[in-house]
Image (cartoon, rainbow, N blue to C red):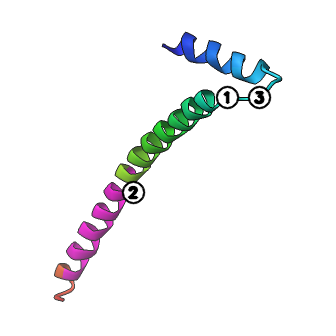
Amino acid sequence: MIATLRTLGRRLLGDARGLTTVEYTIVLCLIAALCVGVWKTFGGNVKGYIQASTTEIEANMAGAGG
């Protein structure tokens, strides 16, 4: 799969005539898939940090009598 994507990438970059509509669609889909993956990865990390901060704040508030 990776080799196929590399071959496709080389072919797209080496084509001096420009990209066709189908090739633009393929590139757009690859970019969208990459964005979704990045969003899910960083979104999960951010959610974890927020939950940890919330838990710590609640513990501090409970310990302070608030």
- In the rendered image, the quadrant that contains the C terminus is bottom left
Q: Which residue is mark 2?
A: 46
Kindly identify the amino acid type of the residue bearing the numbered disc 1: Thr
Q: Residue at x 77, y 28 (%)?
A: 18
Q: Which residues are magenta?
A: 45-61
Percent position (x, y) of residue 12? 70, 22
Kindly identify the amino acid type of the residue bearing the numbered disc 3: Gly
Q: Residue at x 38, y 46 (%)?
A: 40
Q: Is residue 59 magenta?
A: yes
Percent position (x, y) of residue 58? 22, 75
Which labelled disc corresponds to residue 18?
A: 3
Determine the CA span between mark 2 and mark 3.
39 Å
**On the picture, is 26 further left or further right than 46?**
right
Q: Main SS of the magenta segment?
A: helix
Determine the CA span between mark 1 and mark 3.
7 Å
**On the picture, is 42 further left or further right than 55?**
right
Local SS, label 3: loop
Q: Quadrant of residue 56?
A: bottom left
- Local crowd size for mark 3, using a 10 Å CA cut-off: few (<14), some (14–19), many (≥20): few
Q: Nearer the viewer, mark 1 or mark 2?
A: 1
Q: Give yes or no for contact between labels 1 and 3 (Cβ–Cβ under 8 Å).
A: yes
Q: Which residue is mark 1?
A: 20
Q: Residue at x 67, y 28 (%)?
A: 20
- Local crowd size for mark 1, using a 10 Å CA cut-off: few (<14), some (14–19), many (≥20): few
Local SS, label 1: loop
Kindly identify the amino acid type of the residue bearing the numbered disc 2: Val
